[in-house]
Amino acid sequence: MAAVIRLLRPSSSSSLSLAGRSFSTAVVTEAVKSQTYTQNPAPTAVDPKGRNVQWVFLGCPGVGKGTYASRLSTLLCVPHIATGDLVREELNSGSNLGKQLADIVNQGKLVSDDIIISLLSKRLEAGEGKGESGFILDGFPRTVRQAEILDEVTHIDLVVNLKLPESVLIEKCLGRRICSQCRENFNVASINVKGENGRPGISMAPLLPPPQCVSKLITRADDTEDVVKERLRVYNEKSQPVEDFYRGQGKLLEFDLPGGIQETWPKLLEVLNLDEQDEKQSVAA
Ligand SMILES: [Zn+2]
């Protein structure tokens, strides 16, 4: 728990309520303000001491955003809130809104910003009631309008943008395989990009299937190069303004993935100023 406790404990002796969400706002606002007026407003490292985790995770399809958001939420004891899950939960709840949502989804329409925001507000309020000390948002906001509305609903203190070069994303998507029998996911792509122009190299080992699955591997119909490229184009077109929005607020942390989970996880903890090792040691002690 050391990482978490370190994170939630302010350095000063001011009174602190773990259930409250507002105790750290002043610190964060000051930090953000000072960043805004410097030459380079982008946060390069994060000092999470003495404040809540109210983070947004951005990243293009295939980058593994959900995986990292979920791992961090476990480490920091804050919920990983994916708006896709909120919509699914409401659909299954049988509520009036759930019925409206079912109509929208069945007609193939997009769920409006207003509905998503109201689901999210409801979720954040419920979390606050339960004493949750923060959140990691995944899949939201997708547009500047959503980002603006989100700013009215809650305070976001950090936006982590996970990045991989397009060539790597394509290779990774084309390497995806599913076992037609046990439905496990694998990846046969072995990625090794040399570092150049000051950028670090990227290496990702394949995730190979066990012998019993090898002959049963299938590829998803939409994992073709054209589909992947189009998916990335659409994503970039929409996400660029959202990134600019948060860059302007001095909250955007750009993170180039150095490889798969094994390579990425320790680096990510480093830039977020977290230490999983501390946690393990303190549990062992
Ligand atoms: Zn299998």
Image (cartoon, rainbow, N blue to C red):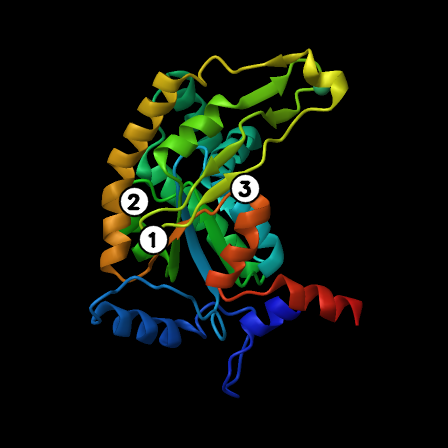
Q: Residues within 10 Å of mark 3 (few under 14, many from 20)?
A: some
User: Looking at the image, which residue sits at the far bottom?
Assistant: 13
Q: Residue at x 32, y 60 (%)?
A: 251
Q: Residues within 10 Å of mark 2 (few under 14, many from 20)?
A: some
Q: Position of residue 100 (x, y in %)?
A: 42, 27
Residue 78: x %, y % from top left: 56, 57
Q: Quadrant of the C terminus?
A: bottom right
**Residue 212, relative to residue 52: is it above or below?**
above
At 66% from the left and 68% from the top, the residue drawn is: 278
Distance of mark 1 from mark 2, alpha carbons? 34 Å
Between discs 3 and 1, the one toward the N terminus = 1
Residue at horizontal 61 percent and vertical 26 percent from the top: 186
Q: Residue at x 55, y 68 (%)?
A: 19
* Badge nearest the viewer, 3 or 2: 3
Amino acid carrying label 2: it is Gln
Ligand 1: give its quadrant: top right
172 left or right of 283? left
* Residue highlighted by disc 3: 260
**Camera-side residue of 98 and 147:** 147
* Residue 223 sits in quarter: top left
The quadrant the N terminus occupies is bottom right
Tell which residue pokes out farthest to the right in this image: 285
Give the residue type at disc 1.
Gly
Residue pointed to by mark 1: 198
Q: Position of residue 191 (x, y in %)?
A: 50, 33
Marks 3 and 1, how far apart at CA: 20 Å
Answer left or right for 104 relative to 133.
left
Residue receiving disc 2: 146
Amino acid type, label 3 = Gly
